[in-house]
């Protein structure tokens, strides 16, 4: 069909010409879509503000030869303003949309769409510390993409845990037999927090100390960047002040 509608979360935008913009979106049904929004940079644009990063909209598109064209956009979730008002939330959201852009490079995923929208909604409502929301999102997004970490049994031989070494290249915790020489030892509390972030156990996650959260964040960052094969450009800018 030449015209279609879908729900979409805006991942990023680029200027095109004097008044247009290329919008990269993760949609509910059509995967990742790059489309032109004509005239949205003009002051009189009716839907320019609805097509900013972190916004969720019901969009109507016309299929083009190379890029689709957005012909209509109705707001479903105005998360952008609420997120950008807080630096910690903004930097966390920036990593989220960059990650979603990367893990849906080849094809879309309803699970990835719902996961991202839920994380952005949580950030906008200040439900949890931004870094906890980010770390939980990263671990879950990677799990949906096929890189599920394990923080209980050995990631290599499945020996029942608990174990105290984490090797991101192997997929999480490993037993003493599988652990390569020099594998870092991680305390049980930090491993417990990592497991809670995967499972969405927020009472356990929020009870963790600042030190434990910091150690867990370092492991999550290393795990994400290893499996995505190249660094997340927005990750170094994440604010840790409100964790």
Image (cartoon, rainbow, N blue to C red):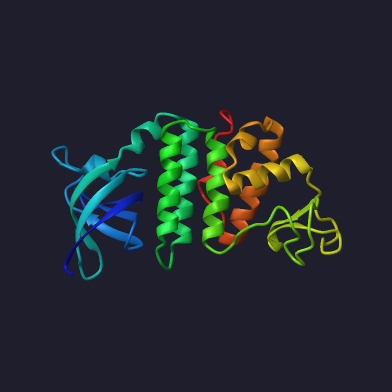
Quadrant of the image occupied by residue 69: bottom left
177 to the left or right of 107 = right
Q: How many marks?
A: 0
Residue 48 in view here: yes
Residue 239 percent location from the top left of the image: 55, 34
Which residue sits at x=47%, y=35%?
89
235 to the left or right of 93 = right
The N terminus, quarter of image: bottom left
Q: Is residue 117 above or below residue 5?
A: above
Q: Nearer the viewer, residue 6 or 184?
A: 6
Q: Nearer the viewer, residue 122 or 221?
A: 122
81 to the left or right of 122 = left
Quadrant of the image occupied by residue 85: top left
The residue at the far left in this view is: 44
The C terminus, quarter of image: top right
Which residue sits at x=33%, y=43%?
55
175 to the left or right of 57 = right
Residue 200 percent location from the top left of the image: 57, 44
Residue 13 in view here: no
Q: Nearer the viewer, residue 81 or 147?
A: 147
Residue 3 percent location from the top left of the image: 17, 63
Which residue sits at x=66%, y=46%?
194
Residue 126 percent location from the top left of the image: 46, 30
Which residue sits at x=41%, y=39%?
121
């Amino acid at each position: 069909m030449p015209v279609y509608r879908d729900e979409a979360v805006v991942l990023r935008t680029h200027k095109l010409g004097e008044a247009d913009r290329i919008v990269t979106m993760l949609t509910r049904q059509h995967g990742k879509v790059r489309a032109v929004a004509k005239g949205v940079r003009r002051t009189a644009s009716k839907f320019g503000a609805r097509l900013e990063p972190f916004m969720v909209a019901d969009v109507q598109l016309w299929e083009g030869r190379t890029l689709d064209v957005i012909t209509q956009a109705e707001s479903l979730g105005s998360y952008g303003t609420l997120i950008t008002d807080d630096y910690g939330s903004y930097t966390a959201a920036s990593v989220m949309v960059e990650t979603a852009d990367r893990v849906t490079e080849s094809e879309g995923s309803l699970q990835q769409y719902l996961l991202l929208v839920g994380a952005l909604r949580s950030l906008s409502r200040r439900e949890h510390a931004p870094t906890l929301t980010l770390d939980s999102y990263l671990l879950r997004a990677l799990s949906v993409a096929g890189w599920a970490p394990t923080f209980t049994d050995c990631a290599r031989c499945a020996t029942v845990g608990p174990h105290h070494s984490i090797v991101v290249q192997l997929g999480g915790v490993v037993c003493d037999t599988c652990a390569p020489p020099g594998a870092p030892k991680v305390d049980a509390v930090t491993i417990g927090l990592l497991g809670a972030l995967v499972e969405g156990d927020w009472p356990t996650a929020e009870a963790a100390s600042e030190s434990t959260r910091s150690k867990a964040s370092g492991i999550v960052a290393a795990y994400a960047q290893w499996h995505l094969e190249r660094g997340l450009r927005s990750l170094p800018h994440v604010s840790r002040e409100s964790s």
